[in-house]
């Protein structure tokens, strides 16, 4: 049974990434389509990384766009105006990740001493501090005038593909790390932190360490995504690079697809980004599209409050449990334990 | 002279105007099953929280295994061999039964990066599952367990770190009679294997047959200490339970 499930997982991943690898070869470069795909994959990677902290650790950070901006500005500062980078900016990404991860450590250490609403406020403050710095640190960031990134010397007819595959690689990395977390004691420890951090401390879980690992890795990947984005759009403005909407995107997509699941954030991105593009197209330049976008999110969350994937697997499990009901009762009696009905509970047990 | 494993020295804790624990001192002998009893609200849970570091004491300290600790921290104490359960069993409902055991067993830094449940973990956890007859539930999300099963799982989990002292907060409250017997049997077995217990318990019959000595708490201070039979007839104790 377990082996079978694992094989289903492998097939799903191979099919998903296989299709995305092949798409460009089939369609060729169609401006709007590649562009939409790049942004969809970008948000899938961002949401998957956010999920490491917001989902697995249960710390819904609102500050992640600051690290997106950090990655974007690193690109713009190193490969400024006339310096032609070619593939070099992509090669530099690991350094961006390490830098961002190191910077995120003290921030995470302070922020993650708080919980819930206080944590949200602390992290969103980080975001606004980053935006203020980007606006006012003129000599480095170019202030409100922004900063250009040297255009890539790629052939016009296939210009988008390097960015496309770079984003896809980052998505694979984010999902690979998510999978590794789930299968290692890091994920096990994070699950205890999410459920009951005080009790986790009490049974010797290295709470601070795993929280910081999750935070730093998450911020590192987000910064790499920001770097690729900056190289792709070619110009970094503070209001777009350090944008609360980017944070909100990561959060909404992860909630929609299912926090703490492998595919949830990806699913969320593949629903919300195209929806957003579609509504932006339909409603034109007016901001009305944001309402439609929010409506999609609200309707789904109304019917599937824990997100799409957890709600579905819950329903499947309940069905299976009902089918196994008789068996369960028997095993209860065998272990001479309480005959009280099993209370299904997902919240924290006090 | 008998060995003192834990001594509580002059613990005091106030919540606003309420003094929940008031200059409380007593000790737990190595190898004993010591009971901590007292009327509702007499400060037993608060005292447990202070001993294990979940609550900061206003004043006082503990001495565990010869080491005096003024600022107990739950994680440190757990690694030193002092573990506890909660009155409302606290398990990790999203984790399976076996994962609840594995995570409480402790692991090295290297282990942190290793498999979620390694072969070694599995072997260790299986032993405990067998001892507690929970094998058939091993892969079940623990959130699906009954209340009594959760209490049993939490007890099994805190034993995974091979503690020398276990604090149990009302292990039999709210569970059925069969489970009470099960709980009692496990406590006896583990005690015979050398584990010391400090138990908060309301079931007086259980206290009388299982525990010795008994510490009686009233309004945050010990008012009596001794064998169950003497406690039973102590006028101060009778007054605390029946009076006012
Ligand atoms: N967190 C708290 N805040 C305020 N008062 C508390 C708190 N915890 C316990 N108390 C009070 O302290 C007293 C002792 O409570 P507790 O230790 O739970 O008693 P017991 O476990 O013996 O029933 C009670 O009066 C209770 O209301
Ligand atoms: Mg109590």
Image: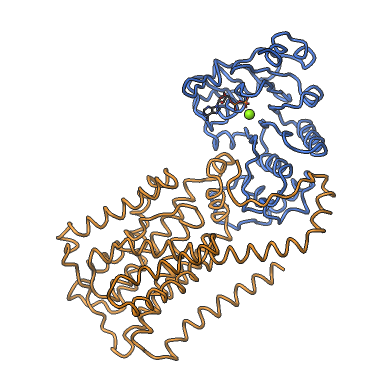
How many numbered circles does the render carry? 0
Residue at (82, 47) in percent of width and height: A335
Residue at (56, 60) in percent of width and height: A182
Q: Is residue B86 left or right of residue B14?
A: right
Question: Is residue A263 visible in this depiction of the protein?
Answer: yes
Q: Is residue B34 above or below residue A94?
A: above
The residue lying toward the viewer, choosing from B47 and B202, is: B202
Q: Is residue B205 above or below residue B230?
A: below
Q: Quadrant of residue B158?
A: top right
User: Can you say which quadrant of the picture contains the C terminus of chain B?
Assistant: top right
Q: Is residue A85 left or right of residue B123?
A: left
Residue A39 spot, x, y in % from top left: 37, 75
The residue lying toward the viewer, choosing from B238 and A52, is: B238
Residue at (69, 61) in percent of width and height: A318
Q: Is residue A29 above or below residue B14?
A: below
Residue at (38, 64) in percent of width and height: A222
Residue A99 spot, x, y in % from top left: 33, 59
Residue B193 spot, x, y in % from top left: 77, 33
User: Can you say which quadrant of the picture contains the N terminus of chain B?
Assistant: top right
Residue A196 spot, x, y in % from top left: 55, 45
Q: Is residue A97 left or right of residue B97?
A: left
Who's orange, chain-wise?
Answer: A
The residue lying toward the viewer, choosing from B109 and A48, is: A48
Specify the colour of chain B. blue
Rendering colour mode: by chain
Question: Is residue B98 visible in this depiction of the protein?
Answer: no
Q: Is residue B69 above or below residue A177?
A: above
Q: Quadrant of residue B122?
A: bottom right
Task: Report ligand 1 position as a quadrant.
Answer: top right
């Amino acid at each position: 049974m377990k082996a079978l499930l694992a094989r289903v997982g492998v097939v799903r991943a191979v099919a998903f990434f296989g299709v995305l690898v092949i798409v460009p070869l089939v369609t060729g470069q169609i401006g709007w389509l590649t562009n939409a795909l790049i942004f969809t994959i970008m948000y899938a990677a961002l949401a998957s990384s956010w999920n490491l902290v917001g989902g697995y650790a249960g710390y819904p950070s609102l500050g992640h766009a600051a690290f997106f901006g950090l990655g974007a500005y690193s690109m713009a500062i190193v490969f400024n105006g006339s310096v032609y980078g070619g593939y070099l900016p992509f090669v530099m990404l690991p350094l961006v990740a390490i830098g961002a991860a190191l910077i995120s450590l003290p921030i995470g250490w302070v922020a993650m001493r708080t919980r819930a609403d206080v944590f949200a406020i602390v992290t969103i403050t980080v975001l606004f501090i980053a935006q203020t710095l980007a606006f006012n640190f003129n000599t480095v960031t170019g202030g409100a005038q922004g900063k250009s990134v040297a255009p890539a010397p790629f052939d016009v007819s296939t210009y988008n593909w390097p960015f496309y595959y770079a984003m896809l690689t980052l998505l694979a990395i984010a999902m690979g790390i998510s999978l590794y977390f789930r299968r290692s004691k890091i994920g096990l420890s994070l699950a205890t932190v999410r459920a009951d951090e005080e009790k986790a401390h009490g049974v010797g879980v290295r709470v601070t360490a795993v929280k910081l690992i999750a935070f730093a890795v998450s911020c590192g990947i987000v910064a790499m995504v920001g770097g690729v984005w900056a190289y792709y759009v070619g110009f970094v403005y503070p209001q777009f690079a350090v944008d609360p909407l980017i944070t909100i995107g990561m959060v909404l997509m992860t909630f929609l697809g299912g926090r703490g699941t492998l595919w949830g954030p990806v699913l969320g991105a593949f629903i919300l980004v195209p929806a957003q593009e579609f509504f932006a197209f339909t409603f034109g330049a007016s901001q009305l599209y944001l309402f439609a976008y929010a409506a999609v999110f609200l309707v789904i969350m109304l019917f599937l409050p824990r997100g799409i994937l957890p709600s579905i697997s819950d329903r499947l499990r309940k069905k299976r449990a009902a089918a196994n009901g008789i068996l369960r009762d028997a095993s209860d009696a065998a272990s001479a334990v309480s005959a009280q009905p099993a209370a299904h509970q997902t919240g924290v047990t006090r | 002279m008998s060995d003192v494993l834990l001594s509580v020295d002059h613990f005091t804790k106030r919540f606003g105007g309420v003094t929940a624990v008031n200059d409380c001192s007593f000790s737990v002998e190595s190898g004993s099953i010591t009971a901590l009893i007292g009327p509702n609200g007499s400060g037993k849970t608060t005292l447990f929280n202070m001993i294990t570091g979940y609550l900061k004491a206003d004043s006082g300290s503990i001495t565990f295994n010869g080491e005096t600790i003024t600022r107990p921290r739950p994680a440190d104490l757990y690694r030193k061999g002092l573990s506890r359960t909660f009155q409302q069993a606290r398990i990790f409902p999203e984790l399976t039964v076996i994962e609840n055991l594995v995570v409480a067993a402790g692991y090295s830094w290297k282990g942190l990066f290793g498999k979620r449940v390694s072969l070694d973990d599995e072997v260790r956890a299986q032993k405990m599952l067998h001892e507690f007859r929970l094998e058939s539930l091993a892969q079940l999300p623990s959130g699906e367990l009954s209340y009594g099963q959760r209490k049993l799982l939490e007890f099994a989990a805190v034993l995974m770190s091979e503690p020398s002292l276990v604090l149990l907060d009302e292990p039999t409250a709210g569970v059925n009679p069969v489970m009470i017997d099960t709980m009692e049997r496990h406590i006896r077995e583990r005690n015979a294997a050398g584990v010391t217990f400090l138990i908060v318990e309301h079931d007086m019959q259980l206290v009388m047959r299982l525990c010795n000595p008994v510490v009686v708490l009233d309004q945050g201070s010990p008012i009596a200490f001794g064998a169950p039979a003497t406690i039973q007839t102590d006028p101060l104790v009778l007054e605390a339970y029946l009076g006012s």
